[in-house]
Amino acid sequence: MMKRLLTVLIAFVVGMNINAQNMTQNVDFNVWPKGELNTGYAKYFIGNSYLAPLDAEHGGPVNVTFEPRCRNNWHIHHKSVQVLICVAGHGWYVEEGKEPLAMHPGSVVAIPAEAKHWHGAAKDSWFQHLTYMTQVGEGASNEWLEPVEDAEYDKLPASQELLGATDPEFNSRFEAFAYGEVVEQVKTRLDDHTRFVCYLATLLGCQGIDEYRELLPQALAKGVTPVEVKEIVYQATAYLGLGRVRPFLTVTNDVLKAQGIDLPLAPQAQTTPDTRREAGTQAQVDCFGEGMRDFWKSGPEDSRHINFWLADNCFGDYYTRTGLSIRMRELITFCFLAAQGGCEPQLKGHISGNYHVGNDKDFLIAVISSNLPFIGYPRTLNALNCIREVEAVK
């Protein structure tokens, strides 16, 4: 029940049109109630906080409002998990031994039992989050610890130093284009789930790690599963290399853990070292046709091993995994290649592969249109030209 409630709340918050003003100095208390001054726990807070139970009779979530600079003491939840969902303003979640996590509307954290942590507002912003407890064990309790001193707190940046506050005009124009005009253009061809799958693959391709970190919680709220996210990141290794993929894997793990998702996820591999080449060859045939059956043993002798690796590693290790269909795997490869640029010969090959698995021309044009705000016009136009060239020789 709580997981379903969490999904509904995330989707609602992510869908809200929150302007830059509400993300910094001011919060509209007509949207999320401020509630009463939190006198009962005041000794565990620096600054004023306010409590507004949303369904006190049934133990539902509580909206907690922090004035600027307000934060609670370090504390531990024993034998229970606390969930935080930011609904307005800007704040911080800090867990001992980990990097501080900036929270803005739509951010979700599931705080593990026994984790020493604190949370509160940014220096220059009100902050509101919903909170509830889950996985409550017998004998659960809260242990309040030392306060967060000013010297420690002041190391964190103010919300004014973040994009939505420092560049409100730019931010509002970008969001209106990327999430308004562009989405309206492609909505008949791309559902939200597919659109966010493409966003994640595209941000991997163009190395947009900060935007990836911002969009991943929204992707999860739109129905992209943790397994699908991991499969996107894993497959990117074949097209981008681990040097560019590993930071994204770290961010992915951090976001999944913050949402209370246990890692590692269930295994998805379907091949062994002995079967991967044959299975990979079959995946190549499924994508590109029977002409790929003997590709693994073709080419000049001094580089034939690379064609072998394409069959047993690229396709045998990744395309054969469960978690994404072959159609979706070809789609994310299209996004990787279009976003990183300089891969036009391979991109044209995978455009043909997309056609072979059911992703037609109009669908791919919708995909590159949707991805344009994240990769810019030159790479978008290059991808479009590749589609035109493939069409010309069909």
Image (cartoon, rainbow, N blue to C red):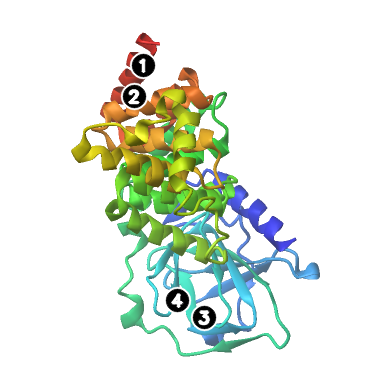
Amino acid at circle 1: Val
> Looking at this view, is 240 or 148 the one in front?
240
Residue 136 locus on image (x, y percent): 70, 77
Q: Where is mark 3, residue-wise?
A: 115
Q: Could you tell which of marks 4 and 2 lies nearer the N-terminus?
A: 4
Image disc number at residue 390: 1
Q: CA distance from mark 4 to mark 3?
A: 7 Å
Q: Is residue 291 above or below residue 18?
A: above
Question: Does the CB distance between marks 1 and 2 fall below 8 Å?
Answer: yes
Question: Is 15 displayed left or right of 274 in the figure?
Answer: right
Instruction: Give the distance between the C-alpha atoms of the residues marked 4 and 1, in whole angstroms.
Output: 51 Å
Q: Which residue is mark 2?
A: 348
Asked which secondary structure carries label 3, the reply is: loop
The residue shown at (35%, 40%) is 310
Disc 3 to disc 1, C-alpha distance: 54 Å
Going from N to C along the chain, the mark reached first, 2 or 3, is 3
- Res. 95 mark: 4
Q: Secondary structure at mark 4?
A: strand
* Residue type indicated by callout 4: Glu
In primary-sequence order, the first of circles 3 and 1 is 3
Q: Residues within 10 Å of mark 3 (few under 14, many from 20)?
A: some
